[in-house]
Image (cartoon, rainbow, N blue to C red):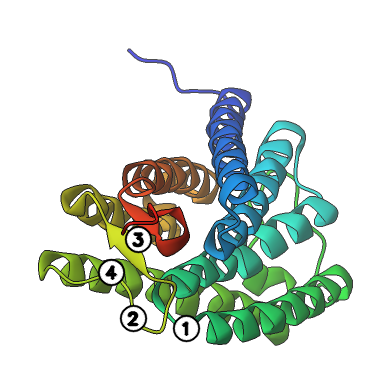
């Protein structure tokens, strides 16, 4: 007969999964930062911010699973992992596909909204204390505003990322540029690689959005840890596959 895992063993596994997600997110952030430092592309800076937020959110989950949840850890996890990270990831998609002036205006607005969100989450009153051993739920701790911010901040940007990735793939399949003419123009040098990379980006975003479905089957802690780790890995693969599939006009040889 297989012994039932103890609570400490379960927590150790959850902490290991969250730790793995933190390391993947950190590696992703360093990769995008290095590319932004070398090439100066605004979408890579947006991805760097997004992956840094994923690192912070995953790190808060890692810390909480290893030592127990506190209100501070939950606020950090909620802000970085539920309110802000996907929005900055979506800004990278907008920079790639849309007009740069529009994307710049959205970036300024997102900076203001990020600061506002940080202030709201930092001082938001709570309905009760966190019970030892539970995975905190925002609906049980926070009022309406923080929960609305999380729903809008993650749901709408996720749709932008998925639609943008699939739309870009469809344009590549039709032998067109993957973005609008008003955007920063990119020359596709590996269409299949770009298409596969975009599909992985869309799939990774879907996985990161699936924690609610998995929570009922695996437990909330395990669901978030697994979806973070798997979703970030898929996103990272998509980035690595697609990152060298295009060249901007600045990177093309002069005779092109």
* Left or right of residue 113, residue 185 in this image: left
On the image, the x and y values in percent for residue 101 come to 57, 85
First reached walking from the N terminus: tag 3 or tag 1? 1
| First reached walking from the N terminus: tag 2 or tag 1 | 1
How crowded pointer 2 is (Cα within 10 Å; few <14, some 14-19, many 20+) is rated as: some
According to the picture, the residue beneath numbered tag 4 turns out to be: 178
Q: CA distance from mark 1 to mark 4?
A: 13 Å
Q: Earlier in the sequence, mark 3 or mark 2?
A: 2
Residue positioned 54% across, 71% down in the render: 91
Tell me the distance, in whole angstroms, between the alpha carbons under discs 4 and 3.
21 Å
- The residue labelled by disc 2 is 180
**What whole-number distance in Å separates the C-alpha atoms at marks 3 and 2?**
24 Å
Residue 208, compared with residue 122, is above or below; it is above
Q: CA distance from mark 4 to mark 2?
A: 7 Å
- What is the CA distance from the residue labelled 3 to the residue labelled 1? 26 Å
Q: Which element type, helix, strand or loop, lies under badge 4?
A: loop
Q: Residue at x 82, y 61 (%)?
A: 129
The residue tagged 3 is 206
CB under 8 Å between discs 4 and 2: no
Tell me, for residue 99, which label it has, or none.
Answer: 1
């Amino acid at each position: 007969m297989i012994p039932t895992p103890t609570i400490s063993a379960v927590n150790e596994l959850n902490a290991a999964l969250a730790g793995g997600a933190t390391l993947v997110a950190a590696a992703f952030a360093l990769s995008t930062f290095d590319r932004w430092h070398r090439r100066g592309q605004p979408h890579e800076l947006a991805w760097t911010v997004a992956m840094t937020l994923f690192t912070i959110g995953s790190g808060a989950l890692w810390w909480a699973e290893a030592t127990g949840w506190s209100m501070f850890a939950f606020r950090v996890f909620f802000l970085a992992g539920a309110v802000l990270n996907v929005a900055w990831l979506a800004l990278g998609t907008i920079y790639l596909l849309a007009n740069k002036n529009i994307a710049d205006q959205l970036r300024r607005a997102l900076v203001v909204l990020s600061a506002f969100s940080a202030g709201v989450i930092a001082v938001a009153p709570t309905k009760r204390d966190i019970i030892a051993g539970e995975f905190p739920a925002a609906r049980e701790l926070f009022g309406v505003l923080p929960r609305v911010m999380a729903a809008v901040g993650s749901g709408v940007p996720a749709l932008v990322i998925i639609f943008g990735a699939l739309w870009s793939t469809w344009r590549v399949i039709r032998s067109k540029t993957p973005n609008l003419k008003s955007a920063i123009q990119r020359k596709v040098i590996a269409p299949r690689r770009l298409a596969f990379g975009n599909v992985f980006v869309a799939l990774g975003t879907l996985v990161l959005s699936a924690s609610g479905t998995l929570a009922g089957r695996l437990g909330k802690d395990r669901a978030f840890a697994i979806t973070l780790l798997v979703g970030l890995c898929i996103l990272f693969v998509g980035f690595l596959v697609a990152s060298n599939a295009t060249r901007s006009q600045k990177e093309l040889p002069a005779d092109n």
